[in-house]
Image (cartoon, grey):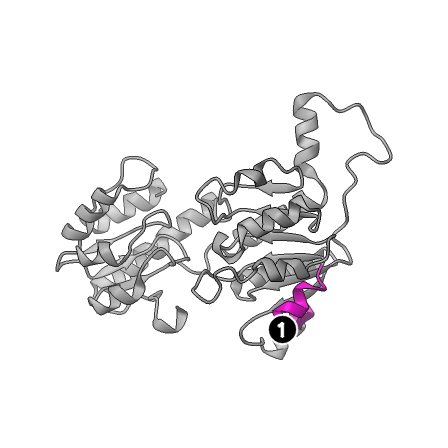
């Protein structure tokens, strides 16, 4: 974690820190859960039922460094009397910024222009060179209108986009009015009418492949899809087929279903902008995440419930 966070952790607790910035091996995770009172994993650490089953009696808190917790078997942890906490809210603006950057990158063909300049192949201004589309006036459909979805809506509203959203529950009227948003009870009807879809819902069993082949087929061929949430929400293979067939105009992706690299076919497409899960990658955001971890651990160590405890209603 950032040095300032590790320093503070070391001042407060007896801490075993990682010496490098790579994922822990399974053996290292097993050793950690057998000895520690608190485990601080990241999204790359799979804390499943098998790992939790090997935990020692001392482990009582999994203080996740990150907002998403789909890599942790929360139900099994709870059954073992182990609490789970996360770091919500601190990367809301950073992730929303990335969603807008991906929208602009795809619609304005920024990576293609960058490549032309880096390769020295640009021949000068031309009326039809690198033609993209403007965001103003376009319909944006937000899938998941939580903290991040609302932050995306506010930014998109400033660009002159029309805001639409699909949620399990409709927002309060005053929240809707604040971003002039239209709620769609039917996801099918919404995706069929949008120019841009922004995926901002968490990864849960109910959102796995929520944008499956059938729903992707409903989208307009001029539409763009952006995902800064979790790769599993989109059927990546179906997305590739749609893009190859010209049935979607483009995609901006910061997360992937197929490992860290995404589908190889995506990397070869000029109308796909891919970034390496950079949504929360700001110095300020990562420090604030660490501060949340410290508060959760300190509160728990003092005998109280962590303020950011993951509870069943969130699953």
Q: Circle 1: is it few (<14), some (14-19), or many (20+) Cα within 10 Å?
A: few
Range drawn in magenta: 178-194
From the top left corner, tell me how far across and down residue 298 is, in percent. 26, 59
Question: Which residue has dot 1 on it?
Answer: 186
- Membership of 190 in magenta stretch: yes
**Quadrant, the C terminus:** bottom left
Above or below, comparing residue 84 to residue 17 in the picture: below
The image quadrant of residue 82 is bottom left
- Membership of 307 in magenta stretch: no
At 14% from the left and 50% from the top, the residue drawn is 35
The answer to whether any part of residue 97 appears in the image is no
The image quadrant of residue 187 is bottom right
Q: How many marks?
A: 1
At 20% from the left and 66% from the top, the residue drawn is 80
Above or below, comparing residue 276 to residue 313 in the picture: above
From the top left corner, tell me how far across and down residue 207 is, in percent. 49, 64
The answer to whether any part of residue 98 appears in the image is yes
Would residue 277 appear left or right of 138 to someone viewing this image? left
Would residue 167 appear left or right of 28 to someone viewing this image? right
Residue sitting farthest toward the top: 120
From the top left corner, tell me how far across and down residue 223 is, in percent. 71, 54
**Quadrant, the N terminus:** top left
Closer to the camera in the image, 122 or 194? 194
From the top left corner, tell me how far across and down residue 198 is, in percent. 61, 57
Residue sitting farthest toward the left: 57
Residue sitting farthest toward the bottom: 173
Closer to the camera in the image, 112 or 19? 112
At 24% from the left and 42% from the top, the residue drawn is 17
Q: Secondary structure at mark 1?
A: loop
Closer to the camera in the image, 175 or 168? 168
Above or below, comparing residue 308 to residue 291 in the picture: below
């Amino acid at each position: 974690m950032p040095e300032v966070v590790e320093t503070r952790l070391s001042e407060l607790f007896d801490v075993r820190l990682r010496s490098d910035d790579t994922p822990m091996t399974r053996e290292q995770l097993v050793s950690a859960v057998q000895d520690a009172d608190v485990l601080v994993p990241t999204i790359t650490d799979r804390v499943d039922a098998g790992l939790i089953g090997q935990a020692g009696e001392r482990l009582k808190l999994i203080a996740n460094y990150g907002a998403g917790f789909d890599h942790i078997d929360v139900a099994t942890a709870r059954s073992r009397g182990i609490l789970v906490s996360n770091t919500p809210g601190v990367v809301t603006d950073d992730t929303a910024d990335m969603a807008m950057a991906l929208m602009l990158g795809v619609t304005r063909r920024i990576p293609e222009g960058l490549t032309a300049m880096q390769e020295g192949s640009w021949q000068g201004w031309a009326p039809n060179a690198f033609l993209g589309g403007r965001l103003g006036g376009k319909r944006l459909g937000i899938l998941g209108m939580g903290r991040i979805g609302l932050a995306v809506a506010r930014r998109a509203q400033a660009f002159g986009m029309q805001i639409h959203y699909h949620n399990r529950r409709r927002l309060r009227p005053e929240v809707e009015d604040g971003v002039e948003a239209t709620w769609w009870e039917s996801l099918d009807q919404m995706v069929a009418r949008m120019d841009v879809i922004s995926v901002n819902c968490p990864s849960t069993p109910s959102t796995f492949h929520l944008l499956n082949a059938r729903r992707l087929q409903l989208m307009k061929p001029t539409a763009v899809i952006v995902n800064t949430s979790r790769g599993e929400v989109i059927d990546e293979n179906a997305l590739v087929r749609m893009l190859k067939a010209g049935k979607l105009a483009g995609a901006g992706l910061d997360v992937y279903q197929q490992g860290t690299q995404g589908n190889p076919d995506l990397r070869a497409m000029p109308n796909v902008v891919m970034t390496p899960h950079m949504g929360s990658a700001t110095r300020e955001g990562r420090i604030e995440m660490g501060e949340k971890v410290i508060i959760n651990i300190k509160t728990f160590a003092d005998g109280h419930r962590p303020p950011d405890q993951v509870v069943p209603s969130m699953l």
